[in-house]
Image (cartoon, rainbow, N blue to C red):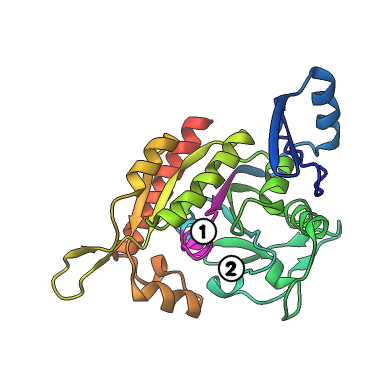
Amino acid sequence: MIFNSSTCVLAAHQSTRLWLNTGSKMLCSKVNQRQAELMARSLPKRMPLPGVQNIVVVSSGKGGVGKTTTAVNLAVTLARHGKTVGLLDGDIFGPSVPRMMNISEAPLVDEQNRMIPLVNYGVKCLSMGLLVETGPVVWRGPLVMSAIQRLLKGAFWGQLDILIVDTPPGTGDVHLSLSQNIPIDGVVLISSPQAAALDITKKGAQMYRTLQVPLIGLVENMSHVVCDNCSNRIELAENLTDKYVEELSIEVLARVPIEKDVMQCSDAGTPVCLKFPNSQLAKAYDMIATKVIDFLSIKQ
């Protein structure tokens, strides 16, 4: 795919439209058969990962809404349901999975030069944070896309029921590279109940729909708190999420409250669903995991 200041082409698998950005105007025209063939040639082919049965992407659009926390606890909860699970940290610039999953060693390499993911809490994990030294990753798009392909196809994942892919905020190179290189079975959207977050999450959802990737549902984070003394539920925002999910024709998978235990467990490298298995948080993540399993079984 080619991106520059004068022309921007967004080509999904079997794309039917060509977008041209010329100055301040955005023009859209249907491509003819010849143009579609030329565009398709330049795209990588969606190839399944050997041994991986299902791939689920966790995406937020906006940062700071609890996406990685959800990805980590979802992966661990799926493993507790008896699934063989992998967790790929696709956030090249700000990887958080190593800290939250309490892993730090560099992965070993097998005879075929494939990285062997680290295992903790019954989940196979791989992250750019395990491969680079401390410091910022200052890369342009081509390097980012190359790194994603290396993490995906340059690793020996073995037999997995589900691979969870934690993605960075936005709708950029990582999301396009994932969608073009592997068959994604579904996307779990993450958002807080603010209109500012929901607006961007909606854009991310529309992007995946354009790329012909199915949406599993939306997880609403940080919408309420539960009082420690009286157990009353205190809402922190207006009920805007229902309006957005209705527009997207998806469901709310769970509404996860704000809890101090989430921050403490994440910093300590122990998923909150393991440390407090009977908490409201653990029940919410169990609900999400159950709905993901049901969606994948119906899809198959």
Look at mark 1 in the image and give the residue it sits on: 71
Look at mark 2 in the image and give the residue it sits on: 97
**Mark 1 and mark 2: span between their CA atoms?**
9 Å
Residue, x 41% and y 58% (percent of image)? 192
Q: Is residue 15 visible?
A: no
Question: For the magenta stretch, what is the residue range?
Answer: 55-73
Among all residues in the image, which is located at the extreme left?
A: 230
Relative to the observer, which residue lies in front, 238 or 65? Answer: 238
Q: Is residue 263 visible?
A: yes
Q: For residue 133, which quarter of the picture? A: bottom right
Which image quarter is the N terminus in?
top right
The kind of residue tagged 2 is Val
Asked if marks 1 and 2 touch (Cβ < 8 Å), the reply is yes
Residue, x 55% and y 54% (percent of image)? 61
Residue, x 15% and y 76% (percent of image)? 229
Where residue 283 sits: x, y (%)?
32, 58
Residue, x 70% and y 46% (percent of image)? 176
- SS at mark 2 in the image: helix
Residue 187 vertical placement versus 228 (above, below): above
Q: Which mark is residue 161?
A: none
Relative to the observer, which residue lies in front, 147 or 82? Answer: 147
Residue 94 vertical placement versus 239 (above, below): below
Mark 1, other Cα within 10 Å: few <14 / some 14–19 / many ≥20: many
137 vs 228, left or right, is right
User: Mark 1 or mark 2: which comes first in sequence?
Assistant: 1
